[in-house]
């Protein structure tokens, strides 16, 4: 390796897996170069969370990062770790700095049947990660109150729209988005579709939301027409916009194999549905792609706290490391691609193939056992470390 990958270490069971993955599957084969940031909660607390910001800036600088799952502290964690305060979600901080789109893709493997059996190929969910209800202003309204949408410029009112006059108690919410963020989102999605040769289905609700959702539709349409239509035609892929409910119905009827572009809330909800339908949280990768071309790879699941407490008691756990391994291979392959380092790309591909063929030949972690069925193969449940060693055998 010539340029380092930004390595963001994390918490609990995934931190344990992180160390083992490096020890068993990467360091024996790659002259690994990383710039290491410890985003474990203890170190975030020691640095007043500065380390998260530094790690995100490094990701921006080098262009490729790999992140371990981290604890987002709540009140219980503040007590458990004697924190100075409930630090913000590291993923939120990183997304704010990189300003990106989150792509979630299931890892499909021979013998593991999704709950929606027609989904033979992966559905990748692209989630806009800015604005809408995640940045909303809300309030209660009392009987007799009138609520308006007021627009000011230089402190002077320029427009006012009546929202509702409340005959009884109620609620009200104000949301926003920006052309800049929606445009960056569109370009990220079009770029990803080209890179992975996937058709796009984008759904919103422009029939009801004639300004807000319609603006998403228009921005996507303009950018597609001006910058991507020719490239899509050459690549033999299509961009499709329709109502979000129509996309949901089409997704279920499909055989998979497309990029499902979602507004922020739709992506939040639908990515959990898609991940679960494909089988296991342990088999879902997540990549943050920033508009200026930085990539951050991670697993879509959390720190698997329940398994970690068993591990601390000295018990074996059968925690699935596949999504975390694929975060590493995603980062190494991207680094190799950017640096023209073909052997690094090849190593990442071989490691992924070794993981899939290990599972395909019947060796896996406990979460996959109930989903596995393949003629002539009896699935064997391994603990996490045994599973990693089995993959290493296959890789060699
Ligand atoms: P979680 O860590 O994803 O685990 C929830 C449950 O899902 C586990 O108890 C386990 O079920 C199953 N599971 C998840 N990943 C698995 C894997 N790799 N192999 C096998 N089973 C797996 O979610 P959580 O327990 O709600 O959250 C734990 C911590 O993670 C929290 O502190 C949260 O803040 C953090 N978190 C971080 C991220 C991130 O960094 N991206 C994302 C989400 C949550 P069984 O117990 O039934 O085996
Ligand atoms: Mg969600």
Image (tube, rainbow, N blue to C red):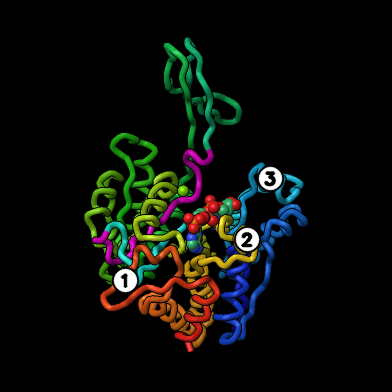
Residue identified by numbered label 2: 12
Q: Which mark is residue 86?
A: 3
Disc 2 from disc 3: Cα separation: 17 Å
Disc 1 from disc 2: Cα separation: 30 Å
User: What residue appears at the point 28 percent right and 57 percent down from the top-left corner?
Assistant: 116
Q: Which mark is residue 111?
A: 1
Secondary element at tag 2: helix
* Residue 295 visible in image: no
Q: Mark 3 Cα within 10 Å, few/some/many (few <14, many 20+)?
A: some
Q: Which of the image's four quarters has the N terminus?
A: bottom right
- The one of 100 and 359 positioned closer to us in this rendering: 359
Task: Give above or below for 18 relative to 240.
Answer: below
Q: Is mark 2 within 8 Å of ligand 1?
A: yes
User: What residue appears at the point 46 percent right and 46 percent down from the top-left corner?
Assistant: 179
- The one of 347 and 389 positioned closer to us in this rendering: 389
Residue 137 coordinates in the image, percent (x, y): 54, 32
Q: Tell which circle, 1 or 3, labels the residue nearer the N-terminal end.
A: 3
Q: Which residues are magenta?
A: 117-135
Task: Determine contact: label 1, label 3, CB under 8 Å.
Answer: no
The question of residue 132 being in magenta is answered with yes
User: What residue appears at the point 41 percent right and 56 percent down from the top-left corner?
Assistant: 126
Q: Which mark is residue 293?
A: none
- The one of 297 and 68 positioned closer to us in this rendering: 68
User: What residue appears at the point 38 percent right and 79 percent down from the top-left corner?
Assistant: 357
Secondary element at tag 1: loop
Residue 21 coordinates in the image, percent (x, y): 57, 75
The question of residue 359 being in magenta is answered with no
């Amino acid at each position: 390796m010539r340029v380092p990958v930004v390595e963001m270490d994390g918490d609990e069971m995934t931190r344990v897996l992180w160390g083992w993955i490096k020890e068993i599957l990467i360091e024996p084969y790659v002259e690994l170069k990383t710039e290491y940031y410890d985003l474990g909660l203890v170190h975030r607390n020691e640095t007043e969370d500065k380390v998260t910001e530094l790690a995100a800036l490094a990701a921006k600088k080098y262009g490729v990062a790999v992140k371990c799952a981290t604890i987002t502290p709540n009140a219980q964690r503040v007590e458990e770790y004697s924190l100075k305060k409930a630090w913000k979600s590291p993923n939120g901080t990183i997304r704010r700095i990189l300003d990106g789109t989150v792509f979630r893709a299931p890892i499909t493997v021979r013998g593991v049947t999704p709950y929606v059996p027609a989904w033979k190929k992966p559905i990748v969910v692209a989630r806009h990660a800015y604005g809408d209800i995640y940045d909303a202003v809300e309030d209660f309204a009392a009987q007799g109150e009138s609520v308006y949408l007021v627009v000011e410029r230089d402190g002077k009112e320029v427009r006012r729209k009546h929202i509702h006059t409340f005959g009884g108690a109620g609620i009200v919410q104000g949301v926003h988005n920006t052309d800049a963020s929606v445009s960056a989102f569109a370009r990220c999605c079009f770029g990803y579709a080209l890179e992975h040769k996937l058709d796009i289905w984008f759904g919103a609700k422009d029939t009801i939301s004639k300004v807000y959702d319609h603006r998403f539709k228009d921005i996507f349409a303009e950018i597609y027409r001006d910058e991507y239509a020719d490239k899509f035609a050459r690549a033999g892929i299509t961009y499709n916009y329709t109502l979000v409910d129509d996309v949901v119905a089409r997704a279920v009827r499909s055989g998979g194999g497309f990029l499902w572009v979602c507004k922020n809330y739709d992506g939040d909800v639908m990515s959990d549905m898609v991940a679960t339908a494909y089988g296991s949280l342990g088999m879902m990768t997540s990549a943050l792609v920033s508009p200026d071309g930085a990539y951050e790879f991670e697993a879509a699941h959390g720190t698997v706290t329940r398994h970690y407490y068993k591990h601390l008691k000295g018990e074996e756990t059968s925690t699935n490391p596949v999504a975390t391994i694929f975060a590493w291979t995603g980062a190494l392959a991207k680094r190799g691609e950017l640096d023209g380092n073909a052997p690094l790309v090849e190593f990442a591909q071989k490691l992924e193939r070794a993981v899939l063929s290990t599972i395909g030949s019947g060796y896996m972690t406990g979460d996959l056992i109930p989903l596995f069925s393949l003629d002539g193969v009896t699935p064997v449940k391994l603990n996490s470390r045994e599973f990693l060693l089995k993959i290493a055998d296959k890789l060699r």
